[in-house]
Image (cartoon, rainbow, N blue to C red):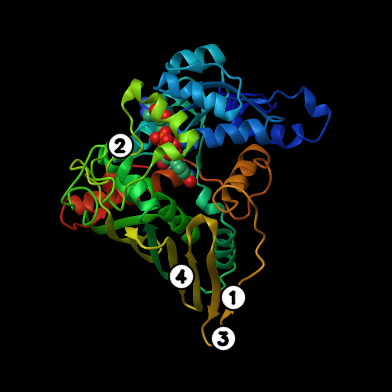
Amino acid sequence: MDPLNQTQVSRRGFLASSGAALATASSSTAAQAKPKIRIAQVGTGGRGVYWGTDLVKNYSDVVTLVGLCDINGKRVKVARELMGADAPTYVDFDQMVKETNPDLILITTTDSAHAGYIVHAMELGKDVLTEKPLCTDEQQAQAIRDAEKRYGKRLIVGFNARHYAEAKKIKQLLMDKAIGDVISVDYQEYLDTSHGASYFRRWHRLKEMSGTLLVSKSCHHFDQVNWWLDSPPVEVVAYGDLKFYGRNNSFRGTHCRVCPYRNKCQFFWDVTKSASAVKLYVDCESEDGYQVDGCVWRQDVNIYDTYSVMVKYANGARLTYTANTFMPYEGQEIGINGTKGRIDFNMYGGGGYKDFQLRMTPNFGKSELVTDLPRRTGGHGGADPSLHDLIFREWDQPDPLGLKANSLAGALSSLVGIAGYRSIERGGERVKLADLAKL
Ligand SMILES: NC(=O)c1ccc[n+]([C@@H]2O[C@H](COP(=O)([O-])OP(=O)(O)OC[C@H]3O[C@@H](n4cnc5c(N)ncnc54)[C@H](O)[C@@H]3O)[C@@H](O)[C@H]2O)c1
């Protein structure tokens, strides 16, 4: 029986029905009888530990973490300790699912491994919550959409970037037609020599692992614009290059800890200064050789560190997007140009919100700052707790801003990035999303 069709709230079909159970479970005694959602998590690196810790600390009234899995048998045990969880640990996903019988699979592995687990989890009859990006190439996008139809399971993508106070306000302003119809969006992303460099130290540096930063990083931004515009992206043109990291240096090592150039390299980073990073990564290297302090100058870097993308939307709007990953400061500059005015959002200093400004300027009217937005504390400027509450406490409540991101949203945001790297591979050719996958 397809659990999604059950009218009675059950642990099955979490994303379709059990938000109601979650919402009441925390507040009524009658709901005590309602079972908690059983979550099995795969991928227990930094982000995985963040999710797991949050579930244990803040959502244990509505969810139970029943299993943890990672290909690195040491890391998954350290992760359990860091999370404060008591779930059994596994290196075999199928064994975990068989033994723990979860309702929901939470996927926090490296990017290119998401799709395989999504499809397999659905095949095993499970709903899925996955970190972004949904997938890293067009075949994966197709396989996920096909699996969802075939197995009738549901999927949510953890797009926390929709949950920034300013992102929500922009959505509201656009829904209210505050600037009329949107003609174009200008979006510039700046990653600094710390945050930006972090992607070139690790697996993200390999296209086959991350789908390049056009997918791994920029899927957040493409999703925001897709959601703001409420119209599907249809066509992409992009240029990109590796101009700074990788081969672009006269010296290189393997990883910082043993590097002979540590005294002269401005990118020397001492992982041993972080006790938790040593526990989670350095002490587990014997299992898989994964070094989080890899050299940013390695010759095998095959992603782009600078890129420019143009996207055409079904409604005729255009996005002009650039990202640079070796900037002296973090930030974003976003301009949304409508028939009746413009919205500007400028943010410098990253998710910590050091300096930011949202401005609304009607044509022929007074330009005003939008201030006093409700702001939460917590990861990514309060965006993470907002996302987690939506999923675990508010799933059955009205969602006027459309914050819930399903597989289509995940696929379209990934596909903009995938079309972007295909376009770059083909020397700036125009790539139609419909030619990549039939969604
Ligand atoms: N939404 C956000 O703000 C945000 C922030 C950081 C990371 N992320 C995403 O979270 C995910 C994890 O990122 P991270 O920084 O924790 O990376 P990480 O390298 O710290 O951890 C990834 C973990 O996945 C494990 N893994 C890899 N392949 C696996 C497989 N086939 N089966 C089981 N485990 C496997 C690795 O051993 C590692 O423990 C990525 O998809 C990343 O894009 C999202």
Asked whether, in this view, residue 87 is left or right of residue 110, the answer is right
On the image, numbered disc 3 is attached to which residue? Answer: 365
On the image, numbered disc 2 is attached to which residue? Answer: 209
Residue at coordinates 60% horizontally, 68% vertically from top-left?
Answer: 176
Q: Using the numbered discs, state the Cα–Cα distance from disc 1 to disc 2 in whole angstroms.
A: 41 Å
Q: Position of residue 232 (x, y in %)?
A: 41, 55
* Disc 3 residue: CB within 8 Å of ligand 1: no
Residue mark closest to the camera, 4 vs 2: 2
Residue at coordinates 57% horizontally, 86% vertically from top-left?
Answer: 365
Q: Indicate the quadrant containing the N terminus: top left, top right, bottom left or bottom right.
A: top right
Query: Foreground residue, 336 or 329?
Result: 329
Instruction: State whether residue 10 is above or below residue 182.
Output: above
Q: Position of residue 395 (x, y in %)?
A: 64, 40
Query: Foreground residue, 135 or 74?
Result: 74
Residue mark closest to the camera, 1 vs 3: 1
Amino acid type assigned to the residue bearing label 1 in the image: Leu
Label 3 environment density (alpha carbons within 10 Å; few <14, some 14–19, many ≥20): few
User: Which secondary structure lies at badge 4?
Assistant: strand
Q: Ligand 1 lies in which image quarter?
A: top left
Q: Earlier in the sequence, mark 3 or mark 4?
A: 4
Q: Using the numbered discs, state the Cα–Cα distance from disc 4 to disc 2 in whole angstroms.
A: 32 Å
